[in-house]
Image: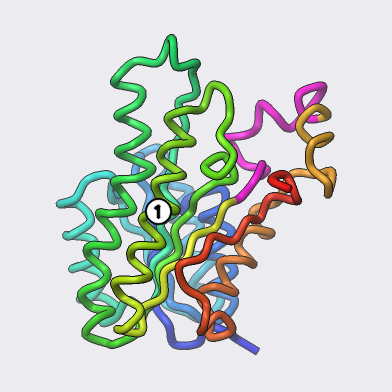
Amino acid sequence: MKLLQGKTAIVTGAARGIGEAIVLLFAEHGANVVFTYVSEASAEKATALEAKLNAFGVKAKAYQSNAADFSACEILVNEVMKDFGQVDICVNNAGISKDNLLLRMTPEQWDDVMQVNLKSVFNMTKQVIRPMMKAKAGVIINMSSVIGEMGNAGQSSYAASKAGIIGFTKSVAKELGSRNIRCNAIAPGFVETDMTSYLQDGEAADKYKAGIPLNRFATGFDIAQVALFLASDMASYITGQTISACGGLNI
């Protein structure tokens, strides 16, 4: 059974990692997929991913767009509406980390993380709610983190940005629930991506896995399955929630 047949989804920051896993699973379940990448260096990979998605028999398109730029998000959603005619699902996945102890953190490092991780969620949500309100239906999924729930030494900016996403998600859910627009967040733990590659082997990996009851890092597919559930009608009565997909790390 295809859970997203006929839907159109936008996923930001999806040329790799969790975002890539999400768009592949969405396409497998019948969704037309729009995904963004920000760096010219990712263009070749984005083109290859677009071809993979189209092979599922859906319409897919990659856009080079910076979710941290409000004007770029406005242009993106306008183009998507012209090309696809609708926006049913928006997954705000774009994110970075610039870890540093607070004592050494620069204002620029703090601002960069807030701009990409938190302001991007405002930027995209602001744009997609108009067509969703007109359609009287929609799903917004925001990628938070277990670090936003727990905090972590050396990650004050990342934790603050991801905690902000949780508060934003709850507020949007209350504002838009009467319009049949659901808004939820996912809080992954450690996931096997490029961002965590330095943690995945050796003593560092053993240390972190020891604190995870399931004793492993998540795969992108693990997180994509949560996104699929929240995007589908199976979650039709779920809004304003944060689903922790962390292997029990936050117990």
Q: How crowded is mark 1: few (under 14 residues within 10 Å), some or many (20 or more)?
A: few
Question: What are the residue bounds of the magenta stretch?
Answer: 188-205
In the displayed structure, would residue 102 be above or below residue 208?
Answer: above
- Tally of marks: 1
Magenta segment includes 150: no
Query: Horizontal and vertical percent for residue 162?
Result: 46, 44
Q: Quadrant of residue 77?
A: bottom left
Q: In this view, does 208 lie to the left or right of 122?
A: right
Task: Residue 165 in the image: state x and y as whole percent.
Answer: 41, 51
The residue that appears at 57% across and 23% down in the rendered structure is: 153
Which sits in the foreground, 174 or 141? 174
Asked if the stretch drawn in magenta spans residue 195, the answer is yes
**Three-letter amino acid code at the position of disc 1:** Gly
Q: In the drawing, does residue 199 fall left or right of residue 177?
A: right
Residues 147 and 127: in front is 147
Picture quadrant where residue 221 is located: bottom right
Is 41 situated above or below 133? above
Q: In this view, does 116 lie to the left or right of 45?
A: left
Q: What residue is disc 1 on?
A: 167
Tell me what residue is drawn at x 37 percent, y 60 percent: 62
**Residue 55 appears in the picture as rendered:** no
Residue 35 position in % (x across, y down)? 40, 60
Q: Position of residue 28 (x, y in %)?
A: 59, 76
- At 66% from the left and 26% from the top, the residue drawn is 198
